[in-house]
Image (cartoon, rainbow, N blue to C red):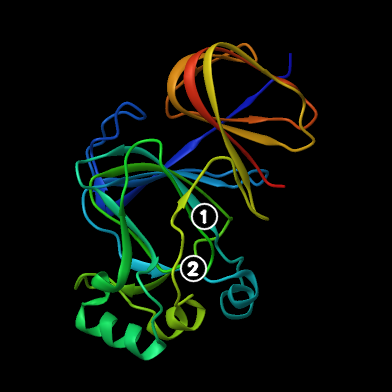
Amino acid sequence: MAKIERVAPSFQEKIWGSTGLAPWFPEPETKIGEVWFDSPHLPLIKFLFTTERLSVQVHPWDEFAREHEGSNGKTEMWHILRAAPGAKVAAGFREPATPEAVRDAALSGTIEAMLNWVQVRPGDSIFIPAGTVHAIGAGLSLCEIQQHSDVTYRIYDYGRARELHLDKGIAVANLGTCPARAALPVRCPYFHTEKLEVRGELQKDASEKITGLIVLQGEGLINGEPFLAGEVYELPAGESLSIRGNGTILRTYIP
């Protein structure tokens, strides 16, 4: 049976983060906002934990990011793990906007009212193509799968003393509406992601791609190796997959 490799986590402190990371990770002493699982063979995988609102932001597409930042662009998706009552995310605008209106609203603080806010619950998925203006609200735990890039243009940040990037942000923003919710599997040029519900035993044929396995809940064995919630594994290309136990796992790879 193929040997799988566990991807090591990296914990990132954030002003909007949380100390309530269970059941995925031990309780930290400082506010952790993001837990990264970074492998060059997989999409970038993160767990996010929010106690405050994140900035209103947008990510550029590849061509713009390479020209202006020397980086890839950033398309991402979120899968909601836990949500406080009324917790919301925003994706796109409620109705088409103009660059001038977005700039004025960002400077005045009224841009939140222009955004398409949707209430979310565990199990929901949201797809955020590059160019989509978006925000994550407070009271959420989610798994993010994205391109390998950390280019973010902040458009509005609730008065926090952090730099804004209005010119670049508006230049790359899709100023129309966006269908925020997505159904798994999610497929785009940068990653494919599906959900595996394991109740006893599950077998998958070999894939031509190196595959990431993100354990959202449960425990058991993946190809003979014990797994727990909050762990991420890398399965070599050309190897079949065998899971025994009970749990929910996201399977993702770069197409």
Q: Is residue 126 above or below residue 173?
A: above
How many tags in the picture?
Answer: 2
Measured from the top left, where is residue 237 in percent x and y?
Answer: 77, 32
Measured from the top left, where is residue 21 in percent x and y?
Answer: 29, 34
Residue under label 1, please give it.
76
Measured from the top left, where is residue 215 in percent x and y?
Answer: 49, 27
The one nearer the camera, 67 or 114, is: 114
Q: Is residue 13 left or right of residue 244?
A: left
The numbered dot on residue 188 is none
Q: Is residue 14 left or right of residue 2?
A: left
- Report the residue at 35% width, 70% height from top: 94
Q: Amino acid at mark 1?
A: Glu
Q: Which of the 4 quarters of the picture holds residue 22?
A: top left
- Report the residue at 24% width, 35% height from top: 20
Measured from the top left, where is residue 10 in percent x and y?
Answer: 44, 42
Q: Amino acid at mark 2?
A: His
Labelled pair 2, 1 in contact (Cβ < 8 Å): yes
The one nearer the camera, 67 or 248, is: 248
Secondary element type, mark 2: loop
Residue under label 2, please give it.
59
Looking at the rendered image, the quarter that the N terminus falls into is top right
Neighbour class for label 1 at 10 Å: few (<14), some, many (≥20)? many
